[in-house]
Image (tube, rainbow, N blue to C red):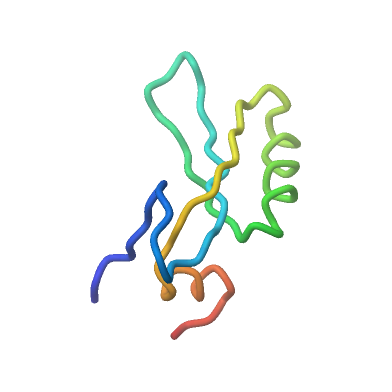
Amino acid sequence: MAAAVRSNSKIANYEIITNNLVSDPDSTYTVNPFSLNEDSEKVVNGLKAIDPDAIITPFPFWVDKPFFRYLHGESV
């Protein structure tokens, strides 16, 4: 099974999703909760409900079609 291809740069024929990057200035770790664009606001609100001080930076992210279908709940 091939690894999913993801990029911060636009790639022709790839789908755009949102990376809701969670970072902490006191840590080297980050969390990358991906979402469909239309679900990003809900994801951010959910993360903020857990930690109102969380630093969340949503940005567009290009992914291959299999990963995009995975986010839609499709297995193939």
Name above or below for residue 44 compared with residue 25: below
Quadrant of image for the N terminus: bottom left
Q: Going by the image, does 20 lie left or right of 64?
A: right
Kindly give the residue lying farthest to the bottom in the view shown: 76
Name above or below for residue 28 compared with residue 26: below
Kindly give the residue lying farthest to the top in the view shown: 26
Quadrant of image for the C terminus: bottom left
Measured as percent of width and height from the top left, residue 45 is found at: 75, 42
Which residue does the image show at 74% across and 50% down from the upper left?
Answer: 42
Q: Going by the image, does 50 lie left or right of 63?
A: right
Measured as percent of width and height from the top left, residue 73 is found at: 57, 76
Foreground residue, 49 or 74? 74
Measured as percent of width and height from the top left, residue 47 is found at: 67, 39
Kindly give the residue lying farthest to the left in the view shown: 1
Which residue does the image show at 68% across and 48% down from the upper left?
Answer: 43
Foreground residue, 27 or 8? 8
Number of disc labels: 0
Which residue does the image show at 45% across and 57% down from the upper left?
Answer: 62
Which residue does the image show at 59% across and 34% down from the upper left?
Answer: 57
Measured as percent of width and height from the top left, residue 32 is found at: 48, 44
Q: Going by the image, does 10 lie left or right of 73?
A: left
Kindly give the residue lying farthest to the front in the view shown: 12
Name above or below for residue 9 compared with residue 51: below
Name above or below for residue 20 compared with residue 57: below
